[in-house]
Amino acid sequence: MKTTISPVFLVAFMAITTSTLLLTPMVAAKASPETQAVIDKVCRQMEDYQFCNQTFNNDLPQPDTDKVGLTKIAIVESQHNATNTLQFIRDLIPKEKDPGQLNHLTVCENAYGIVKQSFDQAYDAFNKGDYRGMQGYERITPRALASCVTIFQVPPKTNENPLNERNREMRILLTMAIVTATTSTLLLLSPMVASELSPATQAMIDLICRQMEDYQFCNQTFNHDLIEPFTDKVGFTRVAILEAQYNATNTLKFIRDELIPKEKDPGQLHNYQVCESAYDTLKESFDQAYDAFNRGDYQGMQNYERGTPKAIASCVTTFKVPPGALDERNREMRILLTMAVVTSSLLDK
Ligand SMILES: *[C@@H]1O[C@H](CO)[C@@H](O)[C@H](O)[C@H]1NC(C)=O
Ligand SMILES: *[C@@H]1O[C@H](CO)[C@@H](O)[C@H](O)[C@H]1NC(C)=O
Ligand SMILES: CC(=O)N[C@H]1CO[C@H](CO)[C@@H](O)[C@@H]1O
Ligand SMILES: CC(=O)N[C@H]1CO[C@H](CO)[C@@H](O)[C@@H]1O
């Protein structure tokens, strides 16, 4: 897209845009086909495509917004949400009388404090062009946020989703699969030096796993399955796909053989059927992704993986969870920060 606007005006425009982004509703530009293609590529990796697509489209400074511009949107929106939610929690705390709930809110205050601070620092690094530093600050946010999510998942209740743990593992595994797939073709990280294979491999594991909501689960999965000759990017991708495929296959069988035949309650049966369909999609997707991987068709592999976050989300959301004041905010935050992490990966080229 050609523009005749002078650079000085453009700089001024960007500066004004940045400073007013949080305050005034803007008439956003309509994305050019090229920009929409990048948005689609990022947002198809999210559990909620529409939320992601709207977030980018609502804030586009110009029709042709490059990866740097999209990264800025993701950071600014994450920072904005974190700031708002931190304030929301701080307003709730003085009103809370129940000591258990107060403790949970305090954990969340701490979590959102870390997320806000990280995005403040990431934004500074971004403005200095220090993309590595930016990624470093962002990398700790999924784990920080997870502490606010898990504190509300109190021990067994009657209506507890029996698939919670499997869903959780599945969500992490498929994110691993997606991130490693992105890594294989887009990231092109610093090449590994053969003579220091072990530290280089662990560095690669750390790079991937620090983006996950549960570092240890991810680290253990890779460490358990890595075969020395395969510890390059291709090897990581293979482990992530195989583990995802294995979990999907097991859980589909568990739903079909254990849960559905024994369930008498029609509502619960319906939930299990939604999950059966979701895990069927997951298994099928990873079967095909693995075939594509073995053919060396990495683009095809990514295409098969792309629908998996949405599939798993359908099994998660079909269960009615106890209403939590922070559920929706946590969800939005989780998507926004994944957007930030994924868009920053794109900057590595
Ligand atoms: C993404 O958002 C744009 C702008 O709102 C819209 O035109 C487009 O249809 C959306 N894409 C999809 C697949 O919904
Ligand atoms: C990751 O796993 C390896 C192997 O189990 C272990 O040696 C290492 O300490 C773990 N890393 C962290 C940061 O816990
Ligand atoms: C609480 C809060 O700030 N929520 C916002 C998070 O970001 C999304 C997308 O920009 C907004 O729609 C929410 O209002
Ligand atoms: C149900 C199932 O297959 N769970 C497995 C999912 O993957 C993790 C990591 O490899 C295993 O520890 C689980 O047993």
Image (cartoon, grey):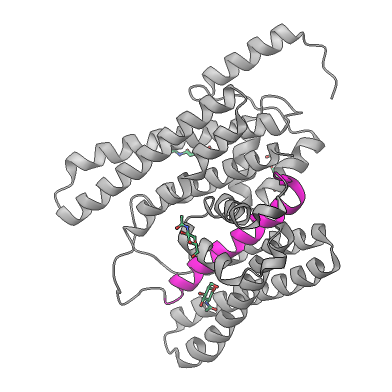
Q: Which residue, as the protein is rendered here, is positioned at the far front?
A: 195
Decide: is 281 above or below 126: below
In-front residue for pair 244/315 = 244
Specify whether residue 214 is in view.
no
Look at 49% across and 37% down and name the residue there. Answer: 137
- Coordinates of residue 17 in the picture (x, y in percent): 59, 19
- Residue 243 is situated, as x and y percent measured from the top left of the image, at 61, 72
* Residue located at (42% from left, 77% from top): 162
Image quarter hosting the C terminus = top right
User: In the image shown, does 287 or 3 lie closer to the viewer?
Assistant: 287
Q: Which residues are magenta?
A: 162-190
Nearer to the camera, 265 or 307: 307
Observer able to see residue 184 = yes
**Residue 112: quarter of image:** top left
Q: Is residue 243 left or right of residue 99?
A: right
Quadrant of residue 198 within the rendered picture = bottom right
Percent x, y for residue 170?
A: 55, 68
Q: Is residue 263 magenta?
A: no
Q: Quadrant of residue 11?
A: top right
The vertical placement of 252 against 186, above or below, is: below
- Compared across the picture, whether 103 is left or right of 179 comes to left
Q: Quadrant of the N terminus?
A: top right
How many numbered tags mark residues here? 0
- Residue 173 lies in magenta, yes or no? yes
Kindly report the secondary structure that dominates the magenta region of the rendered protein: helix
Q: Is residue 47 left or right of residue 89?
A: right
Q: Residue at x 77, y 51 (%)?
A: 185
Tell me where residue 225 appears, x and y as whole percent. Answer: 60, 71
Q: Residue at x 45, y 92 (%)?
A: 262
